[in-house]
Amino acid sequence: NAGVTQTPKFQVLKTGQSMTLQCAQDMNHNSMYWYRQDPGMGLRLIYYSASEGTTDKGEVPNGYNVSRLNKREFSLRLESAAPSQTSVYFCASSDVGSGNTIYFGEGSWLTVV
Amino acid sequence: RKEVEQDPGPFNVPEGATVAFNCTYSNSASQSFFWYRQDCRKEPKLLMSVYSSGNEDGRFTAQLNRASQYISLLIRDSKLSDSATYLCVVNKGSGGYQKVTFGTGTKLQVIP
């Protein structure tokens, strides 16, 4: 059971570089999310997609863009990475049909130097 | 005031002990509540939902007090494997989109 799969698991970037975090879920969920988690800050929502074809800003969207490519895939792009974006990023999905439980991917550890 | 507040701990308890965590939330319109468990360098996973009537799952009991706006998690007969961070989650949304707020977590360390 794959659930939510995100890549890469680890990445080191130089300031100013760009990269895309990929996420896919095989549970046929409508809603997908990108969170970042920093020590002492908890999980903070970057962007979400309530359903295929829609995306909305969360709590901390600055410096990020997203694409809901189809129902399965939701990618997060850093256009010009900054050291403040060093964090652990979690993709997640949920659906009414699954009891609204949020299922997370294993996380992507990103370091910007 | 934070939307969801938890004592960060750590709570260091011996095996077999009973430990309780509380979590307070500020938005009275919050609709549903959950406890998630997160192991070190892993993703959060659902531990249990929290219902108004209280609910129990083995050694774990969760309760909701809407009047005082807090939820609690009680762990009985603690095991070493219970060592983790426990996240309180509050949901203001409805339908498919979960407008959730996560607490920063309470760290539990069960000691042999």
Image (tube, coloured by chain):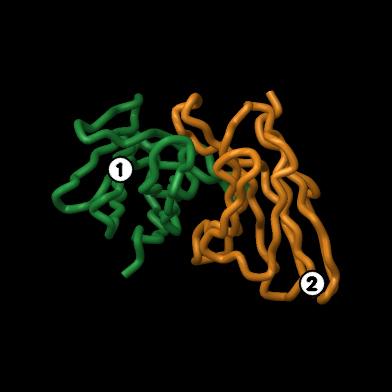
Chain colours: A orange, B green
Looking at the rendered image, the quarter that the C terminus of chain A falls into is bottom right
Disc 2 chain ID: A
Task: Using the image as rendered, state which of residue B44 and residue B61 is in the foreground.
Answer: B44
- Tell me the residue at 29%/37% (across/down): B62
The amino acid sitting under disc 1 is: Gln
Residue position for label 1: B31
Q: Residue furthest left?
A: B67
The amino acid sitting under disc 2 is: Ser
Residue position for label 2: A80
The part of the image, by quadrant, that contains residue A52 is: top right
Q: Taking A21 as reference, is A63 above or below it?
A: below
- Mark 1 Cα within 10 Å, few/some/many (few <14, many 20+)? some
Q: Taking A13 as reference, is B72 above or below it?
A: above
- Tell me the residue at 29%/27% (across/down): B56
Q: Is residue A29 left or right of residue B107?
A: right
**In the image, residue B5 lies at what x, y percent?**
34, 60
